[in-house]
Image (cartoon, coloured by chain):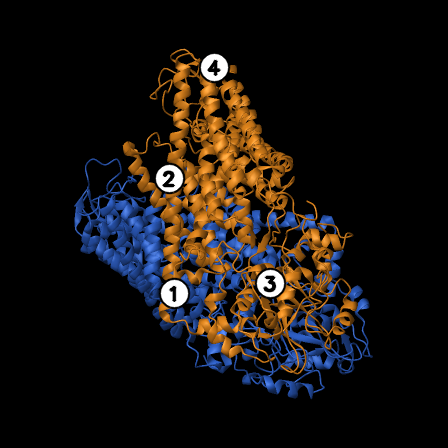
Chain colours: A orange, B blue
Amino acid sequence: MGGEENDMEIEGGMGMGMGRGRSGASSSSSSSSLREPLLLSKRINNTSQLAIVGANVCPIESLDYEIIENDLFKQDWRSRTKTEIFQYIFLKWTLALLIGLSTGLVALFNNIAVENIAGFKLLLTNNLMLKDKYYQAFGAYAGCNMVLAIAASVLCAYIAPAAAGSGIPEVKAYLNGIDAHSILAPSTLFVKIFGSIFGVAAGFVVGKEGPMVHTGACVASLLGQGGSRKYRLTWKWLRYFKNDRDRRDLITCGAAAGVAAAFRAPVGGVLFALEEAASWWRSALLWRTFFTTAVVAVVLRVSMVFCRSGKCGLFGEGGLIMFDVNSAKPTYSIPDLLAVIFLGVIGGIFGSLYNYLVDKVLRTYGIINKRDPSLKVILAMTISFLTSCCSYGLPWLSQCIPCPTNLGDQCPTVGRSGNYKNFQCPPNHYNDLASLFMTTNDDAIRNLFSSASDKEFHLSTLIVFFAAIYFLGIITYGIAVPSGLFIPVILAGASYGRLLGILLGSLSDLDAGLFALLGAASFLGGTMRMTVSLCVILLELTNDLLMLPLVMLVLLISKTVADCFNKGVYDQIVKMKGLPFMEAHAEPYMRHLVASDVVSGPLVTFSGVEKVGTILHALKITRHNGFPVIDEPPFSDAPELCGLVLRSHLLVLLKGKKFTRQRVMTGSEMMKRFNAHDFAKAGSGKGIKLEDLDMKEEEMEMYVDLHPITNSSPYTVVETMSLAKAALLFREVGLRHLLVVPKTPGRPPIVGILTRHDFMPEHILGLYPHFHPHK
Amino acid sequence: MGGEENDMEIEGGMGMGMGRGRSGASSSSSSSSLREPLLLSKRINNTSQLAIVGANVCPIESLDYEIIENDLFKQDWRSRTKTEIFQYIFLKWTLALLIGLSTGLVALFNNIAVENIAGFKLLLTNNLMLKDKYYQAFGAYAGCNMVLAIAASVLCAYIAPAAAGSGIPEVKAYLNGIDAHSILAPSTLFVKIFGSIFGVAAGFVVGKEGPMVHTGACVASLLGQGGSRKYRLTWKWLRYFKNDRDRRDLITCGAAAGVAAAFRAPVGGVLFALEEAASWWRSALLWRTFFTTAVVAVVLRVSMVFCRSGKCGLFGEGGLIMFDVNSAKPTYSIPDLLAVIFLGVIGGIFGSLYNYLVDKVLRTYGIINKRDPSLKVILAMTISFLTSCCSYGLPWLSQCIPCPTNLGDQCPTVGRSGNYKNFQCPPNHYNDLASLFMTTNDDAIRNLFSSASDKEFHLSTLIVFFAAIYFLGIITYGIAVPSGLFIPVILAGASYGRLLGILLGSLSDLDAGLFALLGAASFLGGTMRMTVSLCVILLELTNDLLMLPLVMLVLLISKTVADCFNKGVYDQIVKMKGLPFMEAHAEPYMRHLVASDVVSGPLVTFSGVEKVGTILHALKITRHNGFPVIDEPPFSDAPELCGLVLRSHLLVLLKGKKFTRQRVMTGSEMMKRFNAHDFAKAGSGKGIKLEDLDMKEEEMEMYVDLHPITNSSPYTVVETMSLAKAALLFREVGLRHLLVVPKTPGRPPIVGILTRHDFMPEHILGLYPHFHPHK
């Protein structure tokens, strides 16, 4: 939060301060090509970088979806043969296939591991309980949980802090063009997979669905990079994917595959990627994403058949989440609808309250987590102990219920998942609260959704369970463990729905399992604010299309109600983490401003043929990522804007050391020495660093021709362009730098550069505090 | 096709010819603000306007999704109160509700009418058949068909030619920004509804699904206009929707509602709008569309309950399309998968062949239809007679089959829909070919999909039916009748699938009904090339999620195979109609061109304060829709670009007659006289016409200040901007005019204007024939 942590990158050369009148004079008088190198700390434009919960504060880079048209790249396109184009298309689909395959297999591994670890733990506890060794049982239960919790949080705290939390906000931000540090790194993937397994197996009220989305995105990113350039393990063909655009598409596929794998919902996965994750979308991508999720579906189906034969240990039929509420009758009357509407309204309120509380808890934890990694582990241990106490302790409040007589199912169920847990009860009795607490989260949801057991759960049981899960869910998210939000919300929602179903029993004839499903829908709508994708995911989960109108109704109502209070939980987390997310629409106050009103900071420009020392100096004293290139006499009649050159390209160019003693254009010669591949975006590493360059004194006085690497078609706006329309251009085309050019002749050909940060409400409202944020 | 029919609008002032070098000299020497008014016929830039099949060749306008920021509109935003913003949001949702409600009711009306008319016709025929009056039966059958066909085609040919065909290509083009004449007019809506009812009832091999999409779009457009301004029936609140952006959103909702109503597939409707119809999309719209389709689902559900009590005549349970293949078992083995893959490949080939033949037939019919409306009617009559002959004649080829004994169902079914039609057979026998031909298309599909009747259809029956339907479907689309493509393709695909199921019976154990479903999927994938939306629509139709992986697989395969041969059928029709559709991606050769390479034609600009006569003259001799406004001394130091003024706004301004004798700025005064509402986009009428203006001689010498209506923030590109990137900007932001500004100082401040037509491949390849279309 302090000045030192302001690690946000600065995107380009900035405009000439605030005064439009002043800018003409101040810059035309300066003849040096490196203009006004003010101190960095003077820059106003820094979005407050709140501590990232469960992760270190890290540098944030923007991604660049603009087509860079410099001479070198153009030459590369022209020389591309038909074979190469075919290779590209073939690889695109192969990668989609591989992403689907890997994500499916990872999901399978995850599920098998969780079921086996958690199953072992529960069996152990159960066996001790059967022998009336209640204290030992608690010890074993809490101990197992603690060990697993420590394992998960140590991985997260020390190896990959970016793996903590859901990961969906980070993926969403990435697909919006924000590259937070190591968010898709191999270490993050590793920790996400194992941390999630340990975390879920530890009995935390967390899901494996959010982490699965992040995992899918990481897998896609890794596959797209095709190994590491550092270790020379790179596959030449994958050079086509070494740019932000193709990588974005891959990661969109990965996120969709993650949802598809988590819920076994291929269509839901595509819709999730579309509605929640992606900021840019096109029809062609829809098809590729769909292909990926289809592969996931096939992988899961094949492996389920394989596992059904008992080769996967305790992982049985119920392992992969899929709830059947088939027996619910699909007819409903007006009172039923009223009950459903009521359920939706209350669900929306609880959902937005959930968001509010999660935000508060995250901010509190942020302060703790920032201090030291060991504190993160201690926090996770505390929550683990609390969870164990709740899970083991609360069922004692519940009375033993005699097993129903006319039951096809086993009662009490011992040694496997099922609705009837024995716990401390005598034979032929079951403890309904234990049936929810002393099982995996997936099984608890399945129990709540089951309609065969209409009278199975007492009212008091559901109240206790709902209250416990609601608050455990809130305080668990934010600890240093990969933790999805779907499952806690579905659990709380399902118990709420079933509870309301009992309370409204006199009004409505709907099935208790259906009420649980609708309750879950209302909570999901209230927290996540998705509509179509949630609806399809729920349908694919429950495999019953006839409930579609009711689910739609509940989702619409709860989202509408919750939207009155606050934003969706993922948007909220993105905002809290200080990620500069570009919204799809411009804020109303932007209509009253023009582009030049918000450009700020010193503008650093280069000549078309520039002195090496000047470039190196500029790269050192600024952290701009883009520099305008201006052609000046004798290369042109008057100063004119040649284009934009990127820091990463400059570094490669300087490393190549193709300099001349004279100030002459050497473009054609350089085109032979370099090829476009040299300038491709680096993988997870950041490519060449400034410190890697080793310049001799005499080289500093030499010249280098920037034309071949200058993007000669940058998008520009006139300085009097409305800021709202500039923001629209920036967002829709997916830019990183937007050049602002002067309107009147006789001034230097560039006024400033707009970057993502210049469009952030914090920046603009900081400059113009009298604007109302929403008017 | 001659020069006279070249009615394509010309969007703006055009550039200074080809030579960039020349432009500086030629325009700086001309001091008149009206520059180089060349003859219109000299303009190269005209996309060839092929005859629109079943509709008159008509003027095409572009829609404008740009936010117009002129002083008048800005004033309007500033003065907007919170109440007005609330009104806007409230209206948006009310309109969505109304669109859903109306589309649902129209769909219901359509279904009830079709079922009753066709049911009456079939009953009449059946009764005559039972009395062995075979010739009279044919007479009655063919006569009814003929009368209905004449009714449908007369409506289409004489009242609203735009209502012919599917309508989906037109809606798709509209949502891409192309406003073909009267495509959403009230008369089109009327003809679409009744023409579709008559056409489907006439036994044509056409569907009501495509027309339903068009109907939904028309309903949305009409509701958004809120009555007619001409008849003073306009609702003041709806002024917020008098712009192309809000109207686009409404029509997207309408298209989705149409699909939802046609297939009772709310999620499928949303996805269809997203994947096939819309060119621009955002998350907020997803939600609104979803709401609309949810309303449709509720309307249909309620009305089905109502109709089940027998109040809707012959419209029974089966009226609204919904096929159950529930009994199919969801397990499959490797040979099954191989069979399914084979089915997909062949289906893809048949699908692309379908597209090819439809295109050829449409072009042939286009020549006939262009001559005279009466020829359209005669063509429709011919096809109707042919269809009647096939439907009535072909079943005679089939042998009578004894009814299966252990059947819960009635056999033969008399007087209602069912699998077993008696036709000419003795009692307790049925004619399987008649069961497919002598029924409505919906019932035929249901019969093919039904799995209870595994052995019901003979191989020869299916071959005859498939061949007949495939070719009838092809020759029927293109006649002057509202005709959807979904049903013919599903019918042909289902019979193909069932046929292949019998042939592959030894290889695969899959159910015949499931094979029919997969065959339908493969044909749909092969012709329409949608994936996710078709998949969801099919799932919602059949109400069985467990077939999802198989359906996905078939769709992916058939689309991939078909994509090797040609484009999707809707894209093909859009292209054939000569609609200037902007693709989402730029063509490769555009990377080798810059913006100024394609600007063409005379550039007409105005001064900030311009003489009325000059404006009127320019409006008369050109058909440009946008004119750059240039501020010149004394209003500025040097000529500078002030912005862009639209033809429609100029006409309103001139009509207002607020002129001055002196050349002075009167902006602030005019702002009081006009309000933004006066300049809102007209509804279905084209607003004020040039002929409506009645200028006196003295007024022609007066001046008018254009500043208040000049869009002062037009999007601009520098003349050296790559054409590919200019196209991307144009498409992503949804522009109508893109201004090209000079790069070097000392030249006039504008080089030319790019419009939609300048990005069309025909135009560019016409200018630069040496470029390869795809390289």
Please identify, in this view, whether the residue under mark 3 or under mark 2 is nearer the observer.
Answer: 2
Q: Distance between the residues labelled 1 and 2?
A: 38 Å
- Circle 1 Cα neighbour tier, 10 Å, few/some/many (<14 / 14–19 / ≥20): some
Residue B627's quadrant in the figure?
A: bottom right
Residue B412's quadrant in the figure?
A: top left
Please identify, in this view, whether the residue under mark 1 or under mark 2 is nearer the observer.
Answer: 2
Query: Which is more N-terminal, label 3 or label 1?
Result: 3
Q: Distance between the residues labelled 1 and 3?
A: 27 Å
Please give the chain letter of the residue carrying mark 4.
A
Q: Which amino acid does label 3 sit on?
A: Tyr
**Marks 3 and 4 in Cβ contact (< 8 Å):** no
- Element type where label 1 sits in the image: loop
Residue B567 numbered mark, or none: 1
Please give the chain letter of the residue carrying mark 3.
B
- Residue wearing tag 3: B65
**Marks 3 and 2 in Cβ contact (< 8 Å):** no
Please give the chain letter of the residue carrying mark 1.
B
The residue lying toward the viewer, choosing from B461 and A393, is A393
Query: Which is more N-terminal, label 4 or label 2?
Result: 2
- Residue wearing tag 4: A135
Q: Distance between the residues labelled 2 and 4?
A: 35 Å
Residue A108 numbered mark, or none: 2
The residue lying toward the viewer, choosing from A530 and A648, is A648
Residue B145's quadrant in the figure?
A: bottom left
> Relative to A448, does residue B305 appear above or below in the rendering?
below
- Circle 2 Cα neighbour tier, 10 Å, few/some/many (<14 / 14–19 / ≥20): many
